[in-house]
Amino acid sequence: MHSHHGMEAYFSEMDNRDETGFRIYAVLGELFTNPKIRMRVGIYGHFYETTVTGIFDLPDRITDCLADYW
């Protein structure tokens, strides 16, 4: 998990290059205004975005970026 501070919660090209293991990855964004989190499962360079709420309980003030899509 890492943060993009005031920017959007998104996975950058650098993240795509660095996150090559078999793990769950998360990024936080807009921390000072409207905190959001985005999560994905990474399997050796292949990624599948998933909801955060399927894995973690979130505080009310943090928005799951994919919650509206599920």
Image: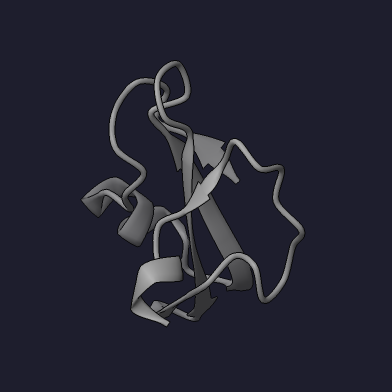
| Residue extending farthest top | 32
The residue sitting at 70% across, 51% down in the picture is: 58
Horizontal side of residue 23 vs 69, given as left or right? right
The residue sitting at 47% across, 60% down in the picture is: 19
Is 55 above or below relative to 25? below
Query: How many labels were placed on the picture?
Result: 0
Quadrant into which the C terminus falls: bottom left
The residue sitting at 60% across, 36% down in the picture is: 61
Horizontal side of residue 10 vs 62, given as left or right? left
Q: Where is residue 42 in the image (x, y as percent from the top left)?
A: 50, 76
Residue 55 location, quadrant: bottom right
Horizontal side of residue 16 vs 34, given as left or right? left
| Residue extending farthest left | 13
Is 55 above or below relative to 34? below
The residue sitting at 40% across, 20% down in the picture is: 33
Residue 22 location, quadrant: bottom right
Is 65 above or below relative to 51? above
Q: Where is residue 7 in the image (x, y as percent from the top left)?
A: 29, 28
- Is residue 33 or residue 55 the one in the foreground? 33
Is 31 above or below relative to 58? above
